[in-house]
Amino acid sequence: MKTKIIPFVFLISCFTLAQNVKITILESEAKDTISKHIYGHFAEHLGRCIYDGIYVGEENKVIPNTNGVRNDIIKALKELQIPNLRWPGGCFADIYHWKDAIGPKEDRKHIENLSWGNIRENNAFGTHEFLDLCEQLGAEPYLAVNMNSGTVQEAMEWEQYVNNENGASSLTDLRAKNGRDKPWKVKYWGIGNESWDCGGHMTADYYVNLYKRYATAMTSYSNTEKLYRIAVGPGTDDYEWTETVMKNIPARRIEGLSVHHYSVFDWSSKGSSFEFSDNEYYKTMKRAWFMEEFITKNSEIMDKYDPEKNVGLIVDEWGGWYETIPSGGGQLYQQNTIRDAMIAGLSLNVFNNHADRVHMANLAQTVNVLQAVILTKDEKMILTPTYHVMNMYKVHQDALLLPTTIENNPDYNGIAAISVSASKSENGTKHISLVNIDLIKSHDITIDIDDISNVSAQILTSKKVQDHNTFENPESIKPINFKDFKVKNGKITVKVPPISVIVFKGK
Ligand code: AHR
């Protein structure tokens, strides 16, 4: 009898061992800080992001607002500790002329938004309104200059208008006349946007030469160190572009390289944002995981030219992109489901784990456009599953990255099911964010971490991956406390449910 039972038990335990996922947190190897700017956002003049989204106008008596900006949005973004906001585009930046949108509102030139639906815009939301909003939010502004239909002079003057001391020139006199004495001191400047596409269909060589003109003119010898100039990088696996930019722009003229990656499985048929098949979900996750390869390969090229890692990799557009819902009332309006929570959790783990090179990232976009954290309809507002992931993960902002390894990461149709990142904040609190993208299976995980106690956790999940919040039921998806784990001898053991994001906290 015995000889028969022992091999059976042995087999069972081997099977269990092979299935158990082991995460090890290597605190002794920690050296990099996760920049808070990885948790940045992007607001473009597109669809209902700015007009009838963030900005409803000063004269709006129905929706409570401050200088025309919705109070509920300000409160929700402050809660996220939004570190920066990129504006005015995107493609829109390349048709935007900042001087059209300053001074008395009734005198501002109306423009046709040629990038997004030829909508007439009255320019009521311009430089002052945007920079004042950033001040209210406590967020750093990130301005994108018009490189395609604008001029070097125009970009240079924008920088002088917003950054130079009172009395410096007629430009700062004009700023004061328009109600602002003090400069805003804008540090982050994007020079061009997707210059290989909507930003002018340029070759990399042409872009580099043009970039150098902007980057030189926008800075004087005395203020170079104040600006963080971000050059255009690729939005696909065109690593030649990265090579050309990194090789040819002198180190003293570049602080960041922007890359874009959307988790789209088919650009010609992007699928519904809330009625999608298991296969479409899987294909989206595959594209989301591409972020790891995309960052790794761009970083390898950057390492060749910038081994000290002074130039930041700036992922200033990322997220899911599906077919527009026409009833949303604006271009690129889409719903936001648990699938988007998976994209967010996974992508933010990737960014955290590359904190040595990724210095900033901007989710596309903030309100009513693409993978928005907030959706609005008249006076109503929804916080999306993506909002909740951002909120759960904000604990990683400016914390020390704790490197992690994963053994036996379960296979989900050829891609990894589990993603993780961990950090330690200044007060010694440790956070571990775990994502299980598996649609069906829970996974047993052991997290090996030196010295942790008082562990608590929150989870964001739902029964179906298509589940989302609606204006009728805005709180059906939100984080809840999670207690289904054990802590013993520096090990957390947990069964992570399918399609879930969990953040552990302990000291
Ligand atoms: O985020 C929407 C658009 O996607 C941006 O305007 C552009 O930069 C990108 O192609």
Image (cartoon, rainbow, N blue to C red):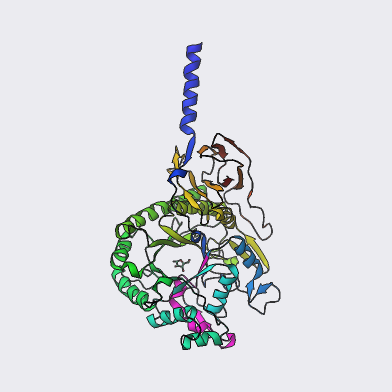
Judge left or right: residue 51 versus residue 151. right
Residue extending farthest to the top is 1
User: In front: 373, or 171?
Assistant: 171
User: In front: 342, or 138?
Assistant: 138
Q: Quadrant of the C terminus?
A: top right
Q: Is residue 367 above or below residue 449?
A: below
Q: Image point 53% across, 46% down: which residue? A: 432
Q: Is residue 88 above or below residue 23?
A: below
What is the x, y in percent for residue 94?
43, 75
What is the x, y in percent for residue 38?
49, 59
Tell me if I can see residue 126 in this picture.
Answer: no
User: In front: 224, or 235?
Assistant: 224
User: In front: 426, or 208?
Assistant: 426
Judge left or right: residue 403 versus residue 128. left
Say if the magenta span includes residue 110.
yes
Q: Is residue 5 above or below residue 187?
A: above
What is the x, y in percent for residue 228?
42, 69
The magenta segment is 84-113
What is the x, y in percent for residue 340?
54, 54
Residue extending farthest to the right is 62
Q: Image point 54% across, 85% down: which residue? A: 176
Tell me if I can see residue 185 in this picture.
Answer: yes
Q: Image point 30% across, 73% down: which residue? A: 209
* The quarter of the displayed image where residue 264 is located: bottom left
